[in-house]
Amino acid sequence: MGKFNSLKYSIVFNTLGILIFFLGLSMIFPLFYALYYQEEVAIYAFLSSIIITSLSGLFLHFNFKTEDGIGRKEGFAIATLGWIIAAAFGSFPFLFSGTLTNFIDAYFESMSGFTTTGATVLQYIEGNPLSVLFWRNQIQWIGGMGIIVLVVAILPALGVGGMQLFKLEVPGPEPDKLKPRIKETAKLLYLVYIIISALQVVCLYLTGMSLFDAITHMFGTMATGGFTPKNLSVGHYNSPTYDMIMIFFMLIAGANFTLHYKVLHGDLKSLFKDREFLFYLGVIVISIFIITTQLHLYIYKSILTALRYASFQVVSVITTTGFATTNFDQWPTLSKSILIILMFIGGCAGSTGGAIKNIRILILLKKVGREFQRILHPHAITPIYVGDKKISDEVASNVTSFFLLYIMIFVFSSLVMAALGLDLVSAMTSVAATLGNVGPGLGLVGPTQNYAFIPPLGKILLSLCMLLGRLEIYTVFILLIPEFWKN
Amino acid sequence: MLLKVIIIGAGKVGIQIAQTLSTENHDVTIIDKREDIRQDLDSNLDIMTIIGNGANVRILEQAGIKEADMLIAVTRIDEVNMVACMTAKQFNVAKTIARIRNTEYMYSNSLSKEKLGIDYVINPERATAKEIVRLLKTPSNVCEAQDFASGKISLFGLKIEEDCHFANKKIRDISFGRHTLMAAIFREDNLIIPTGNDEIFIGDTVYLLIRKENYSDLELLCNKKSGVLQNVLIFGGSNIGIQVASLLNKIGIKTKLIEMNKQKSETISELLPQTLVINGDGTNIELLKEEGIEKTDGFVAVTGYDEENLLVSLLAKHLGTKKVIAKISRTNYIPILEKIGIDAVVNPRLTTASAILRFLKRGELITLTLLKEGEIEVAELIAQPDSKINDKPLKSIDFPKNSIIGAIIRNEEVIIPHGDDFIKSGDKVIVFTKTTEIKKIEQLFL
């Protein structure tokens, strides 16, 4: 299995080749839009991007032929390098079309897309070629379920290697398998993703949105990404109907897709038996309640209006989508503070959402409770249960370290951002919003602002934060440990 | 056709079967009680792991028993295996296999297979004992002996020693006779599917397929006589030891059995009236000499301890026993054993896994046996009326590498194939291949 051997470069590059090749092929969709709208600059941009990307992919794939399998180490290398490289190739259409002129900006935008963050450096979104905006949202959709999971679903016989890769990309402490074979599991997850996505497009289209807007907003919603082709985000439409549809689908995207599979199979019960899902709903309901009350007291006269804006923003932030229907930066402090907390909680395991994840918070809370138990009864055997599932000590300790690492990265990056000249709120929320893959923060990076003003070093750091958030830290950090590269 | 298989018990046998089936892309779900195995299984095999009791209906439902084609129960506990199979039959699982150690269950007719819902019962000790007896009957440098096609053809693993007359020769310069095929060479942990240009070296293990009518060729090839097996000394009164003794007694071979435990020795002597049971320490060289180890034809070490089996077997070989066979439980020892002078090694795990796999007919594929810790698979496939491989001279077929056609069975007749032979529809074809290539071969027969 090559578990303890030195890193096998050939299989890493071979697999990355396939990933890049398919990424290149997927640029055909925006190319169609460019041809349809006759956006000449964009046509050439996409044509050259497709050629460069797919040829690089083919070159890598055929230049590194090997019989080796993917072991643990190769898995880490493929996942991390895969995302770094995909973001680089994904930035070409922005550069070639002239939408962005600077590579760091384009890379930031692309990474923000793939990691479903939704932080943008575009000062004006409208006015850019529609096909480029389509691409900007399409990469969110691909990154949502995962580029590596896609490769696992497409590639024949990855076997055990597929499981290694799958585990690294599907968020949460312990990914579930739907079928014995990982390839089938990956395929089913994508199928569920596609079905729900199609459903949303239909809902939006039937309620009057144009097809282009419906598809791009679906990309942003289902991936919990948050890019939109509008300057004012979803606030552009000022439509309660769209708000409700978006809230519903954001909620779904932030929950575990394994549960959705079960629901689609008629097993509705399992949804409401799942402790993580209930916790997730609980947090949302309580947050909406507090914020609605406060907004009603301070801003909106109508309680319904308060409820509408509160629920949209709460769901948008906790699912780490980052759509906005109002400038929540101007809300009262308590409401803003709750939103910041939600940025850290994030979606559920096995969802397209980011941040720490509800299951981890739940395990941490139970673990704290257990410590009290232990002080009272030093000899008690106190396993941690979530629902009727026992959480092993390894998982519990992994979750604790994850939480610690998450906070450490947050603190360190906030310091760097502050050193680069941002004020306290902007520095901290810019990191929380990128590390948690949310998108907009507060202050200078608030929902009506953008990330364009941040110095290049800051953009690079925030891009790294997005990657760390999406791949859940360990996968990326393990590559920085010297032992990884030794035999 | 891809199968959905549920395996209960992630012991050595369970994992071996899961591995073989999952490399062939079947859907494998494994159920085991121990929580700590999950991590290991998940990172090594592309299968689903469920923690729980395999005889529990809810766990079985979770494992997808309703859609399962097959259930293999190989936990340590016979009763769990039986209950799991009975439950599976309630769900109309087509095939159920149980490992049952306790032979007492098998005698009674009231617990017949039909009533229990078990389609196939495997007793590892009995299967291992049979293998030991088969090995005892072959010349001393044969380390592997298996019968296929209801005994019409046999596979022998032959260790090449210095006195072997085809050591250091090219294969094309050796005359094997029309009815013998050299299917594979195993050298320094590598499998080589030989061509005429390959040379055979001392230390290799070569695999030969020979027709039943031509067994006498084997002795010629080995340059050794099988000799007449007259007496066998068995070290260890384990289940396997008892079974070996009783099998040998049936064919009129004298047996002695050494067992350390007094009480156990007495029980065994009641079970085996024809066997001379000696109560003593088998590691004691004086005792072994007293019992005439120098003049013994066969020595079988089957205690529960690998290390004892190994060392005492070596001792017996040095003292002059013609053929020594050791039972080893830990497969990681096996690669070095045959090098240090033990004639043959048996491993109950591989034997059981092979036996179970042989029972699982997957489409047109039947695994006949696993060799070399499961790395090599000998499989039987049936050529369909429209198989791609039909009616072409074998030399013109683009066969996957590391694979070879060992024999063709046509209307009860065995053909050892050569480049000009054909495969016809309905033929049973015995293929020798690395486990990873089996899918490609199956394609050829579709």
Image: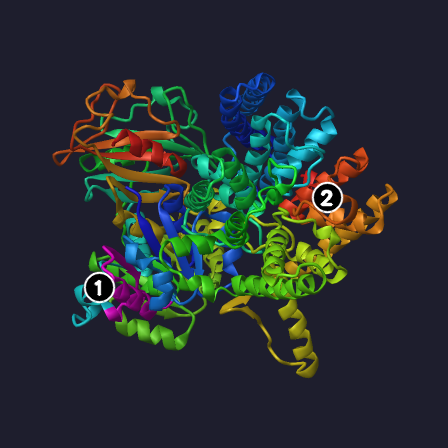
Q: Amino acid at mark 2?
A: Ile
User: Could you tell me residue A309's position as x and y percent?
Assistant: 62, 55
Q: On the rendered structure, is B376 left or right of A216?
A: left
Nearer to the camera, A275 or A35 = A35
Numbered tag placed on residue A481 in the rendering? 2
Nearer to the camera, B415 or A239 = A239
Q: Is residue B100 visible?
A: yes
Report the label total. 2
Crowd rating for badge 1 (residues with CA inside 10 Å; few <14, some 14–19, many 20+): many
Which chain does the numbered disc 2 sit on? A
Q: On the rendered structure, is A105 left or right of B87?
A: right
Q: Amino acid at mark 1?
A: Gly
User: Could you tell me residue B120's position as x and y percent?
Assistant: 24, 57
Q: Can you tell which quarter of the image residue B226 is in?
A: top left
Q: Nearer the viewer, mark 1 or mark 2?
A: 2
Cβ atoms under marks 1 and 2 closer than 8 Å = no
Residue at x-position 68% and y-position 74%: A371
Q: On the rendered structure, is A256 left or right of A478?
A: left
Q: Secondary structure at mark 2?
A: loop
Nearer to the camera, B284 or B334 = B334
The magenta segment: B77-105
Residue at x-position 79% and y-position 33%: A456
Q: Residue furthest front?
A: A301
Residue A154 among those drawn in magenta? no
Which chain does the numbered disc 1 sit on? B
Numbered tag placed on residue B117 in the rendering? 1
Residue at x-position 66% and y-position 66%: A293
Is B132 rendered above or below residue B410?
below
